[in-house]
């Protein structure tokens, strides 16, 4: 049966229309994976020498174990934001004489073959080899290596347990951030020495192989817990039971002043506030407002004037970037219905444009207190806001014409990468890298004032030629209209 499941997975993956359409991103991801493999292999072989050089009077094996605390919390955070439980189309299987436990075991077993589980091995195994070559007891090192592999799997299943309990929340990442922050603070302020405790535990297992039964038992408990959670949800009618919630209607009459695009703006505002993914995105606007506090309080960054352009573009364009990059995929659930109506596509796009412009203005106004760190910062934010309005709004609308991935707004909200394709990766070049590069170059060659003038000039040029640019963008959307309808009709 497992062989049959693997055969179905293989056919589903390579027969999907997204395999051909996302060939570029697939190739990019392969190169990215190879890059990280090389980095981890190099770290594995070179870590022993680095530890000896940095701590010449101490045992490098002990030091390495003391730092495992940071690796564990870092790995857990990375998995929570990037790793998703591998799924398969189980509904057709539920009508067949196949045990639910078989399906669940396959899904969980498949998760153990994740790239996130193999990547640490490219550092663990070379480091173990170097430890044995350095004269450490082979049985001790092999026991430690096996323990590390078990811990990797524990983190794998622990991540899915955390996701299962936080999936219903719009800000589902807050619990994991809170737990990790508390653990880090306890260790940093020496209230509870987590580095020493974790390091001593690994050393105890390495010196006494019988203790390896403890991590094995923890792994078994995590697997069983995941098994029970998935099995309890694996019913044919589980998706038929809908959650009834009371919708709070908001007064959106103020949008009527925008004329014929008002109905589209109202639809967008309702969509943002009534769905998990878009609602959490709106709540995260506070990150855009406070982003500068990560940099400006430090004198080093205040002296790097070109950074103020980057921070300004990201801070004032936070909503623009996060909302705009998935236009029109936000409406993919009813895109066919929308396109069958007697509406002008330019009105549909203009409503998105107005929302993005309003967000830039609001975020700039909220960021005015950054003048406390220097008037140049406020000037840079103003220039970045003008650039976002005149240039980046049009760039991101143009990029939306190439979106071909459907978005399910009911899925987990925070750090959900469903609907992300090559477009979302490539659009970052003209959005962020180009203006930052131009600002840094002109600031270096001429001066700060000239760099500010360049951003403002480009932004004003985009505003002046807005109608012409929207005509070109609208034509591009109309040319792609039926391709997007076809793509949004398929599951990712």
Image (spheres, grey):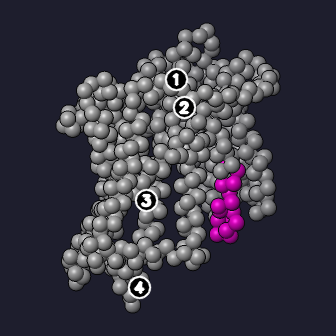
Categorize mark 4 by other alpha carbons within 10 Å: few (<14), some (14-19), many (20+).
Answer: few
Categorize mark 3 by other alpha carbons within 10 Å: few (<14), some (14-19), many (20+).
Answer: some
Residue 93 in view of the camera: yes
Picture layout, residue 466 above or below residue 27:
above
Camera-near label (3 vs 4) is 3
Name the magenta segment's main secondary structure: helix
The residues tagged by marks 1 and 3 sit, at their Cα atoms, a distance apart of 34 Å
For label 3, the SS is helix
For the point 63% across and 14% down, which residue is it?
Answer: 344
Label 2 belongs to which residue?
409
Label 4 belongs to which residue?
55
Label 3 belongs to which residue?
75
Categorize mark 2 by other alpha carbons within 10 Å: few (<14), some (14-19), many (20+).
Answer: many
Q: Position of residue 200 (x, y in %)?
A: 40, 78
- Point out the tag, 3 or 2, that comes first from the N-terminus: 3
Q: Is 469 colored magenta in this rendering? A: no
- Point out the tag, 1 or 3, that comes first from the N-terminus: 3
Camera-near label (4 vs 2) is 2
Q: Is 291 colored magenta in this rendering? A: yes
The residues tagged by marks 3 and 4 sit, at their Cα atoms, a distance apart of 24 Å
Q: Position of residue 433 (x, y in %)?
A: 54, 49
For label 1, the SS is helix
In magenta, the rendered stretch is 288-302
Q: Position of residue 192 (x, y in %)?
A: 54, 75
Categorize mark 1 by other alpha carbons within 10 Å: few (<14), some (14-19), many (20+).
Answer: some
The residues tagged by marks 1 and 4 sit, at their Cα atoms, a distance apart of 58 Å
Tell me, yes or no, whether the two marked residues, 1 and 2, touch with CB atoms within 8 Å.
yes
- Point out the tag, 1 or 2, that comes first from the N-terminus: 1
Label 1 belongs to which residue?
333
Which of the 4 image quadrants contains residue 276?
Answer: top right
């Amino acid at each position: 049966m497992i062989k049959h499941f693997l055969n179905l997975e293989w056919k589903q993956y390579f027969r999907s229309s997204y395999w051909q359409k996302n060939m570029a991103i697939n190739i990019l991801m392969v190169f990215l994976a190879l890059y990280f493999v090389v980095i981890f292999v190099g770290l594995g072989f070179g870590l022993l020498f680095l530890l000896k050089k940095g701590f010449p009077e101490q045992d490098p094996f002990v030091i390495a174990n003391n730092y495992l605390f940071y690796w564990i919390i870092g790995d857990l955070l990375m998995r929570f934001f990037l790793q998703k439980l591998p799924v398969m189309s189980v509904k057709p299987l539920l009508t067949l004489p196949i045990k639910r436990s078989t399906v669940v075991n396959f899904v969980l077993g498949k998760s153990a073959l994740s790239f996130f589980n193999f990547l640490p091995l490219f550092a663990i195994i070379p480091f173990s080899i170097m430890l044995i070559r350095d004269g450490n007891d082979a049985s001790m090192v092999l026991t430690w290596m096996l323990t590390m592999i078990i811990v990797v799997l524990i983190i794998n299943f622990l991540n899915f347990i955390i996701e299962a309990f936080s999936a219903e929340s719009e800000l589902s990442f807050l619990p994991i951030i809170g737990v990790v922050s508390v653990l880090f603070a306890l260790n940093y302020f020496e209230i509870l020495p987590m580095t020493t405790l974790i390091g001593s535990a690994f050393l105890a297992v390495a010196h006494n192989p019988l203790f390896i039964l403890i991590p094995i038992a923890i792994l078994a408990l995590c697997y069983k817990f995941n098994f029970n959670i998935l099995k309890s949800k694996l019913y044919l009618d589980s998706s038929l039971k809908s959650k009834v919630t009371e919708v709070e209607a908001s007064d959106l009459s103020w949008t009527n002043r925008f004329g014929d695009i008002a109905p589209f703006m109202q639809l967008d505002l309702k969509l943002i506030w009534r769905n998990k993914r878009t609602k959490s995105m709106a709540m995260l606007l506070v990150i855009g407002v406070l982003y500068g506090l990560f940099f400006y309080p430090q004198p080093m960054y205040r002296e790097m004037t070109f950074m103020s352009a980057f921070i300004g573009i990201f801070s004032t364009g936070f909503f623009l970037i996060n909302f705009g990059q998935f236009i029109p995929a936000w409406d993919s659930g009813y895109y066919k219905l929308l396109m069958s109506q007697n509406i002008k596509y330019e009105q549909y796009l203009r409503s998105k444009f107005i929302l993005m412009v309003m967000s830039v203005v609001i975020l700039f106004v909220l960021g005015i207190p950054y003048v406390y760190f220097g008037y140049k910062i406020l000037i840079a934010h103003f220039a970045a806001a003008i650039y976002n309005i005149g240039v980046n709004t049009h760039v991101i609308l143009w990029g939306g014409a190439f979106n071909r991935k459907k978005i399910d707004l009911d899925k987990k909200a925070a750090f959900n990468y469903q609907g992300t394709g090559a477009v979302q990766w490539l659009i970052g070049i003209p959005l962020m890298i180009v203006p930052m590069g131009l600002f840094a170059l002109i600031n270096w060659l001429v001066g700060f004032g000239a760099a500010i003038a360049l951003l403002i000039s480009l932004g004003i040029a985009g505003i002046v030629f807005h109608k012409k640019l929207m005509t070109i963008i609208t034509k591009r959307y109309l040319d792609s209209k039926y391709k997007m309808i076809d793509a949004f009709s398929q599951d990712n």
